[in-house]
Amino acid sequence: MYSLLVAEGPDAGARFPLPEREPQLIGRSTEAIPIRDDSVSRRHAELTPDQGRWWIRDLESSNGTFVNGAPVLERVPLGPGDRIRCGDTVLVLIHAEETHTSGGIRAADPTLTTVIILPEEKPSSVSDHQLLPLLQLATETDPAAMVAGLCTVTCELLGAEAAAVIRLNSQGVAIGSPVIRTADGEETETPLELPRQLVQAALASDRPRIALVEKGPSIIALAIRDSDLPPAILAASRGQDRPWQAKDLDLLALIGNVGALLLVSADRITHASRTERLAAMGEAIAALSHSIKNILQGLRGGTDAVELALNRNNVELARQGWTILARNLDRILALSLNMLVYSKDRGLDLESRRPGDVARDAVELLAASALRRQIDLECRPDPNEPPIPIDADALHQVILNLVGNALDAVEDRSGRVLITTSFDRTQDQVAIDVLDNGPGISADRRDRIFEPFFSTKGQRGTGLGLAVARKLVEQHLGTITLLEGNHAGATFRITLPASRSDELDAAGTRGPRALPDGDLGVTFS
């Protein structure tokens, strides 16, 4: 058997059973379903049963008939849950036997429920201190935690077995997954029986409403409203052996007032974080595009030089062009590698190695470039440094980035770059210093040098080298800093812990971690 439930309008909450084999009028006339809405025509629309389902047609009404937002221009079939708008009134077609489950919220069989509309009573006294746990949620910066906390605190204050927040869109349809929590803050696997009549009754009132589910819980629900967001339903359940009292309804009404503010705050935090992410993404794309454009211009310049040299049979000019091409190919390779590292979290493949050996390998790769420019490039590892747990490939890239920046900073024929390592036994750490005699980094830029896409090199830099270096060093539980000193140039220092018993076994390789004590609730085979 089908019924029409009034979701919006003067008759909100009313339910009209439909005859099984007879047409039914909708309108304000005495022969129609009585709708007390002046925007509805006397004979507005007609419902007709045909082959086990209902059909609707508009009867040339003044304001038209709409099904799920679409105008009814001819006879249209209906299904359970369809929303029929006649003027300012919205009716929902429901089936008495319909049961729906979605995301832990289950609509109870309407025939097994009773919605109790309590009369307006004088509010009972509620101590302000009861709401302190709720008000503390306003300091939460995680929107998901804020909403989950609203459910948990609702359970605590009302002595409920479970509480839920169901977000609705402007049409009153549930959006997203509901949030359900028990009094201990845990997610419950038991669906919350939520009668449709209860939701509709709550939406039609400013007071909490109660539904009793046969052989089930007693549920209290309140529509949370704020001008800045669509309504939400705050519901709580407990056994029918613990009936709800007037003070429970008053307390839920107060919770709803604070809950509205929390939901608005959560939405604003979500919107702000999304906006910040989009802005950061836009800046990153702009900076990346700028870097690629500069590199491509360099490649074009080298290509033009080579082409001109071939036309003139000029070997020296061709050599200069190839030098430009090689330099810009190295730049785009470095940019690609840094982008891959920065954009993706990779686990460390730890092994026992001397950082001085890794530094020496990196310096050897750059030795030819330094020699060509007549730059003094030297590596002085500490002979007493022990092997420490490091990802050699990651540390190699860090040192390449730092030494590459140092080589870019110094002058040809007079430049000097020195890499040293030292072991501090008292601090149980190894330090790696990269020094140069370049112009140094001005005070107004020192605080930003580790920001992604911030570069002190102008068009020659991508602004990712130091950001990648910091990310990889911090994955090693180390630090990277720009030291302040009286000497000319810049000095970057990397500090790495000399021991990590949580990562390395006795053999000096990464082994399995010990499982925490206690029952994890998981069976390992």
Image: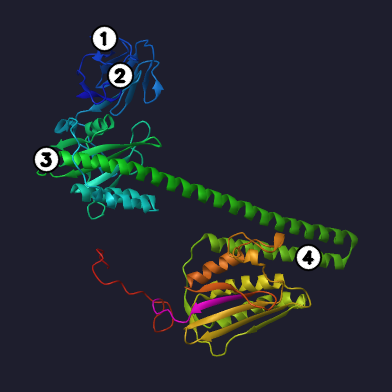
Q: Which residue is mark 1?
A: 29
- For the residues labelled 2 and 1, the Cα–Cα distance comes to 20 Å
Residue at far right of view:
312
- For the residues labelled 2 and 4, the Cα–Cα distance comes to 78 Å
- For the residues labelled 3 and 2, the Cα–Cα distance comes to 35 Å
Tag on residue 199? none
Q: Which residue is mark 2?
A: 55
Span of residues in magenta? 492-502
Residue 511 in the image: x percent, y percent?
39, 77
- Nearer the observer, disc 3 or disc 4? 3
Q: Which residue is mark 3?
A: 215
Q: Quadrant of residue 366?
A: bottom right
Left or right of 324 on screen, residue 234: left
Q: Tell which circle, 3 or 4, labels the residue nearer the N-terminal end.
A: 3
Task: Residue at 24%, 46% (x, y): give it.
Answer: 163
Q: Give whichever of 480, 190 is nearer the camera.
A: 480
- Nearer the observer, disc 3 or disc 1? 1
Tag on residue 322? 4
Asked if the stretch drawn in magenta spans residue 314, the answer is: no
The answer to whether 79 is drawn above or below residue 213 in the figure is above
Disc 2 marks which amino acid?
Trp
